[in-house]
Image (cartoon, coloured by chain):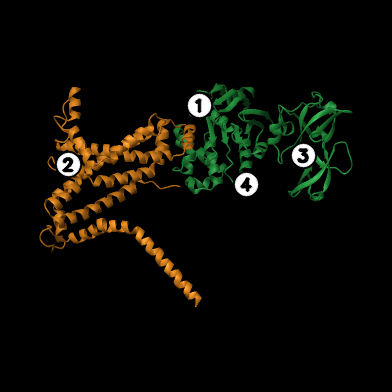
Amino acid sequence: MPERVTKNRRWRVRLREAQQGYVLVAPYLLHLSVFFGYPLLFAFVLMFHRWDIVTPMEFVGLKNFWRLMRDDLFFRALLNTGIFLTIHIPLQIVVALFFAELLNRPLKGRGFFRAAYFMPVVVSGVVITILFQQLFAFDTGLINRMLQALGGEPVPWLVSPALAMPSIAIMATWKNVGLYIVLFLAGLQHIPRHLYEAAELDGANAWQRWWHVTLPMLNPTMVTVVVLSTIGGFSLFIEPYILTGGGPLNATLSAVLYIYNQAFYFNHMGYAAALGFCFAIVIFLVVLLQRRFVETDTWS
Amino acid sequence: MRETARKTGVRLEHVWKIYDNGYVAVEDVTFEVAEGEFMVLLGPSGCGKTTLLRLVAGLETASRGTIRIGDQVVNDVPPRDRDIAMVFQNYALYPHMTVYENMAFGLKLRRVPKTEIDRRVRAAARVLELEHLLDRRPHQLSGGQRQRVAVGRAIVREPRVFLFDEPLSNLDARLRVEMRAELARLHRELGRTVLYVTHDQVEAMTLGQRIVVLNKGRVQQIGTPLEVYHQPANRFVAGFIGNPPMNFIEGRLEHRDGLRFVGKGGQVQLMLNAADWPKVRPGQAVTLGVRPEAVALATVEEAAVMRGQVETVEVLGAVAHLYVRIGEATVVAQVDASVRPALAQEVALRIDLDRIHLFDAETGQALPRARS
């Protein structure tokens, strides 16, 4: 009999502990379900429907996907996003590595610079985009006026279809590079000093030490940076939305901007959901490929 | 012979290393390693031995003095042009390269032809029994195997000088003994100049042809293992080398029917042979040093006898160490384990007067002994 009593009590204690646990994680679960779970589920439903927010939802089966396959603008948006990524990611890695190397050296005011480079990361993207709108402006922009003062021709940064996306890529790099500097800095500081000494004794000059020790030892960081900046890059939206609205000639129409336009400009909610779904699959495949090619086998 | 000795020997002249914060790591160090010699730098941690090695490697720059490798002053020569190879304490293998690539790396950078690289790597792998591991990465190897790869990486370079920085300290005791023998064999076979840093006196005694004993950045003594053991230059060397360490008894010298050492408290009194000690003054404060193996149990009353009580007995198999309390001092005697006395037993100890050392109490320097 007493055994049963203690068992019962233990069970009650456990229940109370579990309840406390659920209370503690409740805010997170609530946030997750309202802002991620519900929209995700709703999007799944939407993909197969036509809905303009006002009139009732209408089931259309796979029609949205048929339409998508023949939608040149969507593939144009994918291509634009691809162009953005091919400029943005390598540029970001080179610039971030360069500054990380610099900030990893004994340098006066190192702490200040580390903070300064990180600042754009925490500043709102809208603010930075408006700032660059001023800088990139054709007639009045600071960059062109400086170029002209130096005797150069003004560059149509945002006006030329060929240059608009690269201009946005430069701006996005400027904004995000601080985060990747910090990641690379952590990676660099993780490399044991004696490896450099061994390489020096093995006959490596500074460049060879960097190529044969630093770069391979940074591989785990490199994978993180490539994957993070790919995912970040795929979600390119604020910059073209504010700066160019997708123009000129759809040259800066990013995938997310196109999806946004379909959803909230044309009220094609179902089609936008289908676009979003396909886009998510594209991102997944690209990241899978990147990991395959960037990541060398790991060591401990 | 002298010709070649100039080519690959190492010579340090009045070398100092003072760090920016004023810390003096190496103070006026001078010594020479002959061609093909196995020289050990021995001292407690923080004595500057690793700094000295790094100075020779070029990983640190000397604040003062000159460092020569062969005929060349290398103070301003970068490490890669010094033609030396170093084995690091933690091996410093490149984790992203295979064993083969680790060993080949230095040769590849020096643009040695591929076939030659292959020949040398495979030869070294054979000597070090690494042939079946060439495709592995360092993290797939045991400590002993990594150690051998680190040695292999040094060997394939065929450098003028090998530098070893406590290479065995990360291995377990059994492996350490094995690798010690292996390093000795390698040195015999390759005949290269070796500078070897360790804090382990057993390594120093077994591997070194000569030993530089260091303390607080200064050279204490340079000599063969037996020289530093039997004729320590000062109290530090005497106490650092030997296990269990040398017994030290503080006291003074007196002239009373001959030369006599009187320990503090008076319990220890020894008649010395005045002819052995030409440079002592009566009344001089000295420290008497005697190794445990020069202290024996005495059965009859003799000249050099002390009485005391057994405090501790350590049996090591064939021998036992007796810790005997005599007045204020504890004297360790090494005796045959089969005749060891019981705890707290009153015993008489005899000291072999031919094997005692006297050190000046102030300077710690050994007092010279007349050799017959």
Q: Nearer the viewer, mark 1 or mark 4?
A: 1
Q: Amino acid at mark 4?
A: Ala
Q: Position of residue A181 (x, y in %)?
A: 34, 38
Closer to us: B289 or A47: B289
Query: At 57% across and 39% down in the image, what residue appears?
Result: B167
Look at mark 4 in the image and give the residue it sits on. Answer: B173
In the rendered image, which quarter contains the C terminus of chain B?
top right
Are labels 3 and 2 assigned to the same chain?
A: no
Q: Nearer the viewer, mark 3 or mark 4?
A: 3
Q: Colour of chain A?
A: orange
For label 2, count other residues whose C-alpha is less than 10 Å away and answer few (under 14), some (14-19) or many (20+).
some
Look at mark 3 in the image and give the residue it sits on. Answer: B328
Are labels 4 and 2 assigned to the same chain?
A: no
Q: Nearer the viewer, mark 3 or mark 2?
A: 3
Q: Nearer the viewer, mark 4 or mark 2?
A: 2
* Relative vertical location of residue B216 with respect to residue B330 in this rendering, above or below: above
Q: Position of residue A34 (x, y in %)?
A: 25, 58
Q: Quadrant of residue A252?
A: top left
* Sequence-earlier tag: 3 or 4: 4
Between marks 4 and 2, how big is the CA–CA gap?
69 Å
Between marks 2 and 1, how big is the CA–CA gap?
54 Å
* Sequence-earlier tag: 1 or 3: 1
Q: Residue A242 shows which numbered tag? A: 2
Query: At 51% across and 26% down in the image, what residue appears?
Result: B61
Between marks 3 and 2, how big is the CA–CA gap?
89 Å
Chain letter of the residue beneath label 2 in the structure image: A
Between marks 3 and 4, how big is the CA–CA gap?
36 Å
Q: Colour of chain B?
A: green
**The residue tagged with tag 1: helix, strand or loop?**
loop
Residues at circles 3 and 4 in contact by the CB criterion of under 8 Å: no
**The residue tagged with tag 2: helix, strand or loop?**
helix
